[in-house]
């Protein structure tokens, strides 16, 4: 602590990604006495963690917020929330049922209210590179990647709530490589690589166990993957595991073939590459047990590059190329955030981590109001 408003951070080694880490909520300022934050609104009521009411904080350091108050409701399911929005009782809906996304986009009444944005969240299946049958079998891992028609799963199963993923780094992330070829759907190449891998010719049982944390959506995706892999001659059995037990298995790298999702902790490629694939994170966030000394050195060099942003990103792109080629994951999807915003709401902007600057949001119900004046209304979410 330098003084009452300044802290100094000392590093054992350079970390050029630290500046991006500072946007993570763990670095936000909180009052140690009552856990209050420093945002533009004050929590005034919490009814059973289902209804939250907020009032405007007039002494907010950026100025007085436009909204005087907000109400946030947690619904039992997304369909209930959608019905409330369609009935005109909500100004903003944070979650749309995947099965309804196509219908809303085509609806004359609600398509203008729809807001979609790719977010820094990936959905994949991990291969434990230290367990059979994936240990040392680079060709098998690549065969599985070529065997999956990601677009078909997005269109027919996920209702356009996701988009196909080409590599580690999702669209909208600092360091995203537009030229990353990734793995296209190529069942003939998948069959050829599978044959070259020698997997089917080895003695012993040939059933892959695909594990996922218990969830209806994950089950449907896993079934689609199993069906597509059967087309190249791979038999897959599904294994649903309760979340706490599943997380324990991940932490101990016990699973061989498993679902994995990752939200960016901060808006930079390092959040995906270093967290998921640097060997120092094995058993922490590197759940595949992936260890490539060359990748470790490149990622460390990227963090040490504090003078040139361009050179830092080149190093991160090179690390991603090697990782994708090594195929410790079955790359699947990037999440799209799908929201509904009422016609009277202004300046509600969603960033690529699904965060909203509520300070700027306005609720305009009458053309009589002067532009820029705070709305006297309460926004319902």
Image: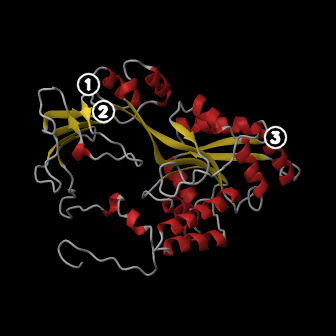
N-terminal label among 3 and 2: 2
| Quadrant of residue 328 within the rendered picture | bottom right
Q: Position of residue 155 (x, y in %)?
A: 59, 30
**Is residue 221 in sight in this rendering?**
yes
Tag nearer the camera, 1 or 3: 3
Residue located 74% across and 56% down the image: 134
Query: What residue is disc 1 on?
Result: 89
In contact (CB < 8 Å): disc 3 and disc 2? no
Residue nearer the viewer, 121 or 305: 305
Element under disc 3: helix
In the image, taking residue 323 as reference, residue 171 lies left or right, namely left
Mark 3 is surrounded, within 10 Å at the Cα level, by few (under 14), some (14 to 19) or many (20 or more) other residues, namely few
In contact (CB < 8 Å): disc 1 and disc 3? no
Mark 2 is surrounded, within 10 Å at the Cα level, by few (under 14), some (14 to 19) or many (20 or more) other residues, namely many
In the image, taking residue 317 as reference, residue 303 lies left or right, namely left
Please say if 26 is above or below 15.
Answer: above
Q: Position of residue 161 (x, y in %)?
A: 50, 35
Query: What residue is disc 2 on?
Result: 92
Mark number displayed over residue 54: none
In the image, taking residue 52 as reference, residue 244 lies left or right, namely right
**Is residue 198 in sight in this rendering?**
no
Residue located 26% across and 37% down the image: 72
Q: Quadrant of the N terminus?
A: bottom left
Residue located 19% across and 50% down the image: 40
Q: Quadrant of the C terminus?
A: top left
Residues at marks 2 and 1, CA–CA distance in whole angstroms: 9 Å
| Quadrant of residue 282 within the rendered picture | bottom right
Query: What residue is disc 3 on?
Result: 188
């Amino acid at each position: 602590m330098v003084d009452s408003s300044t802290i100094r951070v000392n590093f054992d080694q350079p970390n050029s990604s630290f500046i991006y880490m500072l946007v993570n909520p763990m670095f936000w300022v909180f009052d140690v006495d009552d856990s209050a934050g420093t945002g533009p609104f004050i929590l005034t009521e919490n009814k059973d963690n289902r209804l939250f009411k907020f009032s405007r904080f007039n002494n907010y350091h950026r100025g007085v917020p436009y909204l005087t108050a907000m109400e946030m409701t947690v619904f039992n399911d997304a369909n209930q929330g959608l019905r409330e929005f369609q009935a005109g009782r909500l100004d903003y809906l944070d979650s749309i049922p995947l099965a309804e996304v196509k219908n809303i986009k085509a609806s004359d009444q609600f398509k203008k209210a729809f807001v979609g944005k790719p977010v820094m969240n990936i959905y994949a299946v991990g291969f434990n590179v230290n367990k059979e049958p994936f240990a040392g079998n680079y060709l098998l891992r690549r065969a599985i990647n070529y065997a999956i028609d990601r677009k078909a799963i997005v269109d027919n199963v996920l209702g356009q709530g996701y988009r196909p993923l080409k590599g580690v780094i999702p669209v909208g992330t600092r360091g995203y490589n537009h030229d990353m070829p990734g793995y296209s759907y190529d069942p003939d190449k998948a069959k050829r690589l599978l044959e070259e891998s020698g997997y089917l010719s080895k003695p012993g049982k040939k059933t892959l166990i695909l594990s996922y944390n218990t969830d209806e959506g994950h089950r449907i995706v896993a079934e689609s993957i199993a069906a597509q892999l059967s087309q190249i001659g791979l038999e897959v059995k599904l294994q649903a595991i309760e979340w706490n037990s599943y997380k324990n298995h991940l932490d101990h790298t016990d699973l061989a073939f498993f679902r994995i999702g990752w939200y960016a902790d901060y808006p930079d490629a390092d959040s995906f590459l270093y967290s998921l694939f640097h060997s120092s994170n094995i058993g922490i966030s590197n759940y595949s047990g992936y260890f490539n000394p060359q990748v470790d050195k490149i990622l460390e060099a990227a963090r040490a590059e504090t003078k040139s942003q361009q050179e830092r990103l080149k190093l991160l792109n090179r690390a991603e190329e090697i990782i994708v080629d090594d195929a410790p994951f079955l790359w699947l999807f990037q999440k799209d955030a799908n929201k509904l915003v009422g016609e009277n709401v202004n300046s509600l902007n969603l960033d690529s981590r699904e965060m909203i600057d509520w300070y700027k949001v306005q609720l305009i119900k009458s053309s009589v109001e002067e532009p820029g004046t705070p709305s006297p209304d309460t926004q319902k979410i």
